[in-house]
Amino acid sequence: MFNILKRVFYFFILAFLLFACSKQPINKSEIQKTDASKTFKKDLLQIKESGVLRAITTYSPTGYFLYRGQTLGFEYEMLSKFANKIGVRLEMVLANDVDSLIPMLIQGKGDVISTGYTITAERKKQINFVNPYLITHQTLIQKKPTNWRKMGSDRIKKQIITDVVDLIGDTVSVRKETSFYDQLVNLSQTLGDTIYINILPGNLTVEETIKMVNDGLIKYTIADNNIASIHKSHYPDLDVETPVSLSQRIAWGVRKNSPDLLEELNNNIKNYKGSAEYNVIYNKYFKNRRKFNKIISSDYYTETTGKISKYDDLVKKYANQYGWDWRLVKSIIYQESKFDPNIKSWAGAEGLMQIMPLTAKGLGIKDVKDPEQSLRGGLKYLDKLYKNWKSIPDSIQRIKFALASYNCGYGHVIDAKALAKKYKKDTLNWDDGVDEFILKLSKAKYYQDPVVRSGYVRGSEPYNYVKEIFYRYEQYKYFVK
């Protein structure tokens, strides 16, 4: 059924392209620029003070993606290590399309563009680029002739494009706000003739455009060679051997008014690039073809299947019963057990929802390792905690109080709320209110305060627990509509 839906989707895209897309070269001057006078101001110091580095990216099966409930990717891993180095939490901000990257950065919706971004003269007018971490070139994606396996290499070459000159008078399909578009414009000018450009929707990914060539929906597209090469292992009918550019530099981008962040990132790239650790991560995403094929062919490669784990249907069943978003419940389960029903914590909690033996008994759970019993009991307990916080008017904040209670105990959250009231802070909001005092309950000054009844708690655990669940939930909402 899913394959039928995918085919319908791609034929819809094809129809869209035929009726809505341009089939002529576009002048560079038509590209809209963001007003530099409206640039948001935030540099390294403010990022450290906020405790969060926000990275703007788009979905990519090598740069940033979701697999078995876990966010992965080449750029994602590198930037995670950088964020950890400067002592902040990394938060990925997903753009709907490549056209939005620079405007979102300039408007302050993120601090760095972290997708594989080619350095171009046009882009340098608007943003500063970090030292490049990758050198590649653009290559033409085209389909080999039918029955190519029975042909010799010379015969195959005679039936495909092997020189960009042969693209004159033909049509290549790319998204507009990309270096691929710019390169096609430059090629037309250099060759003194016309290569027609079919403008694809900006929200299509490189993976989708490559697949469209493989499925025969478009004739040609362009991709960076490192990405094209790894995809070729999944689509053997494609040829990716014809270069359409010289070497180009791939780098992250920052606002022009973030010089300290730029310097810190430059130093990080200088020390990291070429290291053994860098090579391991690069090979993981661009050289390990077997693993790449395993991931994108998996039922739990979320972008194409919409699935997160094998427990999706079970989670939906009980999430609907209690009125919770099933994607939020999946984020909780990942935080608790990473979908492993056999895992046991140091404290004795077990199962998908990591329920303690005494709690399990009170919930009527006979086997905490049974996924259905664990889900049913865990959500029943969460719902009870949610109802205990009926004094919290905002439903999202109320969920956060319930999650913190699930993690460290209802009494400790009551104590944190009492401290917030004593110090005249917001007691109705977890964020920037009670969460501050759950952290402080690990210090004697606070857990020995007369208003505190449950004593010491390692506050960083519930504090991070809530943040990580909601951050992952946002990612799940992006990947699973």
Image (cartoon, grey):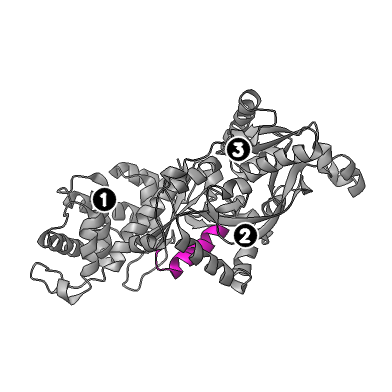
**Label 2 sits on residue:** 285
Q: Is residue 75 left or right of residue 239?
A: left
- The CA span between labels 1 and 3 is 37 Å
Neighbours of disc 1 within 10 Å: few (<14), some (14-19), many (20+): many
Which residue is at 62% across, 41% downward?
A: 208
The amino acid at mark 2 is: Tyr
- Which stretch appears magenta? 73-88
SS for callout 2: helix
Nearer-N-terminus badge (1/2): 2
Q: Residue at the spot x=90%, y=41% of the render? A: 158
Nearer the observer: mark 1 or 3; the answer is: 1
Of badges 3 and 2, nearer the viewer stands 2
**Magenta span: chief secondary structure:** helix
Q: Earlier in the sequence, mark 1 or mark 3?
A: 3
Residue pointed to by mark 3? 3
Helix, strand or loop at label 1? It is helix
Q: Is residue 46 magenta?
A: no
Q: Position of residue 314 (x, y in %)?
A: 40, 48
Instruction: Return the residue at label 1.
Output: 399
- Residue 87 drawn at (x, y percent): 40, 68
**Secondary structure type for disc 3:** helix
Q: Residue at x 37, y 44 (%)?
A: 317
Q: Nearer the viewer, residue 388 or 130?
A: 130
Within 10 Å of the Cα at label 2, are there few (<14), some (14-19), or many (20+) other Cα atoms? many
Tell me the CA gap for discs 3 and 2: 26 Å
